Amino acid sequence: MKTGSKNRIIISGGGTGGHIFPAISIANAIRIKDPGVEVLFVGALGRMEMEKVPAAGYRIIGLPIAGLRRNLSLRGIIANLMLPVRLVESVTAAGRIIRDFRPTVAVGVGGYASGPLLWVAGKKGVPYILQEQNRFAGKTNKMLAAGAVHICVAYPGMEQFFPASKVVLTGNPIRKDIRPATEQEKQEALMHFGLDHEKKTLLITGGSLGAGTLNRCVREYLPRSGDRPVQILWQCGKHGMSQAAEALKEHPSVPVYVHEFIARMDLAYAAADLVVSRAGAGSISEFCAAGKACIFVPSPNVAEDHQTHNAMALVKENAGRLVTDKEAPVILMEKALELIFNDSERKKLSANILKLSRPDAAEQIASMVLEL
């Protein structure tokens, strides 16, 4: 595992696409600036980073760390009782990784997977940078903040969570292919997904893992869809695919195009006239870069209700609309259909969200990493 290359960088964190894709964007930007660099990812065993990171061409080691279960079923209680054991095992494993890989710098992108690795890195004298995607800082990053050299944030005012001298407003790293689409690119994107050029396109995405509430909203919309000139591009997630397929069998004439996962989100954004989404920080940063009019339905199942904070930061700038998870089954689809045919309002939202874009975040963070 030892390496003779000059720069060896560990990037740690994960759990959801909102942590993983920014981490991969940082790694890609570092590689462009320093092609000889060796990058190692450290994530959590059994989580999606163990699949997505190797697919992006990077090596990853998984720790047995797990997050606190919020459901109080017997399985959840037992899992929570095992957390101290998993934590000790993860700290021990992190120590071995630091000893063998000998990183020059570490980067934490949030999520419980980054806690043990960066804590050990700090104890071993390895400088580290934190990247906080959300408007409301996560517990792991808050605990690690004192030892960080820099803390890269996506929203102004994060000094309320972190030492002001360490905070750098960079924005969130995003995939390089995300940007406003030309009319020609929109037509090519519609063709890619087999969509009708004459209809408005509504993109509904629950993020990389899907979202139960959004999936329910689409399923319940199908029998009352009518003959509106609108089509839906629906990313339902792994767990929503079987129900989505069943619902579409019952309503085969409704123009809904379902995908478990959309790899080419740049094309999905290009095709969409309006996006309905959860309010994960990584997704919001991509919507800003793509200049997409959005309705946000923040997940209620996240720490400190951080998705509502993320969405409200845009709503206050008239750069997005918000429907609560509780309201969504009743009003979401009608709100979306009303907005998708209101061209002037959509253009305002699109222009305002584009103003919030920080497309060079990954390059800025990569430069800070390599300076260390």
Image: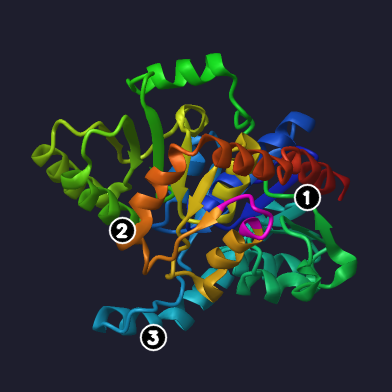
- In the figure, 207 relative to 245: above or below? below
Toward which corner of the image does residue 111 lie, by quadrant? Answer: bottom right
Residue 196, position as x, y percentages in the image = 33, 20
Residue ID at (37%, 66%): 327
Task: Look at the numbered discs 1 and 3 and tell me whether their residues touch, using CB distance below 8 Å.
Answer: no
**In which image quadrant can residue 344 be found?**
top right
Q: Nearer the viewer, residue 134 or 186?
A: 186
Magenta span of residues: 314-320
Residue under pointer 3: 81
Is 322 drawn above or below residue 249 in the view shown?
A: below
* Kind of element beneath mark 3: helix
Q: Earlier in the sequence, mark 2 or mark 3?
A: 3
Is residue 191 left or right of 226 when viewed as pictured?
Answer: right
Q: Earlier in the sequence, mark 1 or mark 3?
A: 3
Q: Which residue is mark 2?
A: 212
Q: Amino acid at mark 3?
A: Leu
Q: Amino acid at mark 2?
A: Gly
